[in-house]
Amino acid sequence: MASGSHRNGGVKVASKLDRLPPSSAGYATPKPSAKSRPSAAAAAASRRGVSMAPSASRVGGDPGVPGRVRVAVRLRPQNAEEMIADADFADCVELQPELKRLKLRKNNWDSETYEFDEVLTESASQKRVYEVVAKPVVESVLEGYNGTVMAYGQTGTGKTFTLGRLGEEDTAARGIMVRAIEDILADTSPEIDSVSVSYLQLYMESIQDLLAPANDNINIVEDPKTGDVSLPGATSVEVRNQKSFMELLRVGEAHRFAANTKLNTESSRSHAILIVHVKRSVKGRLDADQNFHGEHSMSSNLVSSFRPPIVRKSKLVVVDLAGSERIDKSGSEGHTLEEAKSINLSLSALGKCINALAENSPHVPVHDSKLTRLLRDSFGGSARTSLVITIGPSPRHRGETASTIMFGQRAMKVENMVKLKEEFDYKSLCRRLDIELDKLIAENERQRKDFEDEIEIIKMESESRIAEAERSYIDSLENERLKYQEDYLGSIKKLEEKWKCDVEKARIEHQNLCLEKAHSIEAPSICTSDDVSEVRQLHQNDKLLRQSIEDEVNKLKSEVSHWKHLEEVGNAEILKLRKMLESEASQKQKLEEDIAMLKSQLLQLSFQADETKRSLDRGVPSNLSTGFDSLVSQARHSQLRDSAYGPKASIAKLFEQVGLHKILSLLESEDLDVRVHAVKVVANLAAEEANQEKIVEAGGLTSLLMLLRSSEDETIRRVAAGAIANLAMNETNQELIMAQGGIGLLSVTSADAEDPQTLRMVAGAIANLCGNDKLQKRLSREGGIKALLGMVRCGHPDVLAQVARGIANFAKCESRASSQGNKAGVSLLIEDGALPWIVKNANHEASPIRRHIELALCHLAQHEINGKDMISEGALWELVRISRDCSREDIRLLAHRTLISSPIFQSELRRLCIEF
Ligand code: ADP
Ligand code: MG
């Protein structure tokens, strides 16, 4: 096996490509050049000792041209069983041979695109398959390089058909082995060259000789110096013509059959290996070289006549690999666990070597199995290698088909277009996550700062208001007190002065009175009465003054009580402000918790991204697309992979790390972005059947329906509808959706939406509901059929396909109910006015739409009661057309049978004189 000499995917591609000569980018044959120096890749590979055939063993010492494993995918046509069993289902793959792409359908709404070197459709001829897959390898073998052609795929997908068919009865059916020998024999001459063949079977790590079955457990011998691999114990028969080769193949097949019967195995569990050794004389070419140099001198002729004869040895290995399906380790196929392990050993070791080579790993575990040891000198590197992966169309084997495709993708080592983007996207995802994380941290910091500032301002404001209130209260209290004191003192002073003055006055008057008394005795009675009235007057004044002071005191008292009241109000205000502060603080804490949660999600994402990066660095290809949801989808995807090939960065991990309840609770987040991400995650989870029950149990269906009802955001509605559509694949969920008013919500969404993708999801969901026998009447009553028909306004073929699927599902259920006697009366589809659209689109150019409608028409026509409407709407003509022109034989026959057995159609056809 080679290493270091292949192209790798992703960012590394450019540097690797720089080293590749133009011819190696396609299926071109490498041209050996005696003058070329060993490439860096070859040198690195030979240092590791796992590489291509060593230069020393080659005439001319050509180190070989680096190449990479070329991978073609071939789709087997539907077989008779699949035609019946899969009639109502779309194929799981769609080929785009002109773009060399294959689309693998994930479910009714999603598919993944892969690019291959060649994409061979079910109608590809054996000749074409040989020419694109094996001919370049054969040519390279004739040039002196080792070459390998391998077929990998699930049992029954056409590996043996592609490689081993003898084509005795039909030459066009000859497989790669026969055609390769034909080309080799045509290019070699029996006189100077030799072509010999060994035919082996590898089963449970034991190599058996199919040309001499007694040769069991043949040893593999590796030349430690050159690295050449040989099987000295294997029979090698020289082949001189096509006939003798065909005979060998027949003998080999017979022995294989006998050996497998004896070992009680099936051939699908063993690898069949054809080795063609080609030994060619290159004398003619060297002579030509010498002539080219124009030297006809004696000396050069002498030198050439003393030179030993030169031969070029190479081999072509054709491997019909064991079926790639995982064998049941429980032993249900009659194997013990040990047997099961070694049956798969060579195949899984091949996968590991391919991974190691793809990763440029310093260690390629070639010694882990017989198959990889055997292929060591003829796989990749200077050896030209072609792999054809074979797949079947049936959606029932989607898992095996997906793992075959992934094997092919790994073997290519060059990422397909989607992958390339994803690799790039992976890096940008990392960067984006970093940027988003930084942004969130900065935003968080900013928000916290703003919040703190705001709190500070509020605090300061309230403090200043309190202080101001307190100040003004104290001031006014003080003022009042001072004023009162002043007034009081003033009045006291006034009273004292008055009193003094009165006393003085009374004293003087008394003196005068005494004097007057001394001078005259008549006057005293008058004086005394004046005095008394004056004293009375004074007393009165004094009383009034006291009264006014008392009033004043009362007034001040009431003012004090007023200020006390003011103080209480102030205190209440302070309390209110404090409460406000507390609630702001708790809001802040909640915000911080939200931010912390977002941060932890981001951290988790970057952890998963790191995991993915590590897987990528180990060469495990992944299907990263962009963003959060794609990371989840990548995790989901990895579940599909063969466990030997990748870490299970599974959705289960996301469940564990984040928790379904947490994810569902994010659906109600106030942040739109978070809601969008959360609904995408839920939709991705809902796409996995294993998660659906958990989601519904945890209330996810209700949340999704609520989002559909309440969200204004188109993306959320689209993704929620997609998730509901996925959940609606299961009968119990269908009933739950109906019970929770889902059909009404889907109808409203369908009426409001413009985006074809939203409509596609909604139509898909309703189409799934239409497939439930119990929901027929309710669906029609609650407007489900009308909603489906309403969506055809969008005209997008994907939407129309879902509408058609829904109608076909509905018609099928109705037809079943009618034949079981559970339904009488005209079809609800006809009642809801679907017939004109059905008739108009019955011959739609898009085959999925057409097929569903054709099936719907056949189902409707099964019941006589629909006949009248069908005739008046023109559906009869479509049925006649289907019975004559439909490319699907089963539908054609169904239409034909239906027409023949329907008296109403028969009489109408007779009336119109149409022979049927
Ligand atoms: P495998 O070797 O992968 O188990 P086979 O080569 O035995 O599968 O093919 C299984 C069946 O499918 C055979 O009957 C074969 O004739 C048929 N078949 C496979 N590939 C094709 C094809 N491309 N066209 C027609 N029939 C095919
Ligand atoms: Mg086979």
Image (cartoon, rainbow, N blue to C red):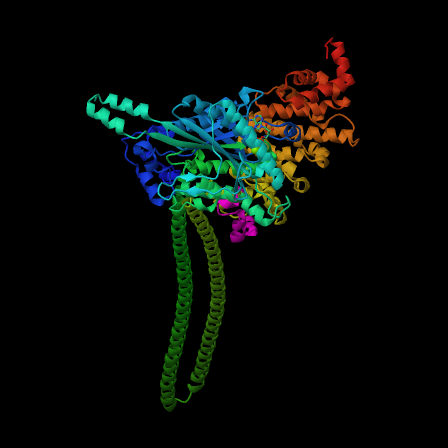
User: Is residue 833 rendered to the left or right of residue 491?
Assistant: right
The picture quadrant for ligand 2 comes to: top right
Quadrant (top left, top right, bottom left, bottom right) of the N terminus:
top left
Q: Is 279 rendered above or below residue 296?
A: below
Of 895 and 425, which appears nearest the observer? 895
Of 6 and 825, which appears nearest the observer? 6
Q: What percent of the width, then of the height, locates residue 206?
A: 53, 43
| Image-quadrant location for residue 549 | bottom left
Q: What percent of the width, then of the height, locates residue 295?
A: 21, 22
Q: What percent of the width, then of the height, locates residue 455?
A: 42, 58
| Image-quadrant location for residue 458 | bottom left
Q: Is 303 rendered above or below residue 200?
A: above
Q: Residue furthest right?
A: 821
Q: Is residue 610 visible?
A: yes
Quadrant (top left, top right, bottom left, bottom right) of the C terminus:
top right
Q: What percent of the width, then of the height, locates residue 324?
A: 54, 38
Q: Residue at x 48, y 24 (%)?
A: 179
Highlighted magenta segment, given as a residue range:
640-667
Residue 163 in the magenta stretch? The answer is no
Q: How many marks?
A: 0
Q: Residue at x 63, y 32 (%)?
A: 767
User: Is residue 467 rendered to the left or right of residue 198?
Assistant: left
Q: Residue at x 62, y 24 (%)?
A: 851
Q: Is residue 727 visible?
A: no
Residue 642 in the magenta stretch? The answer is yes
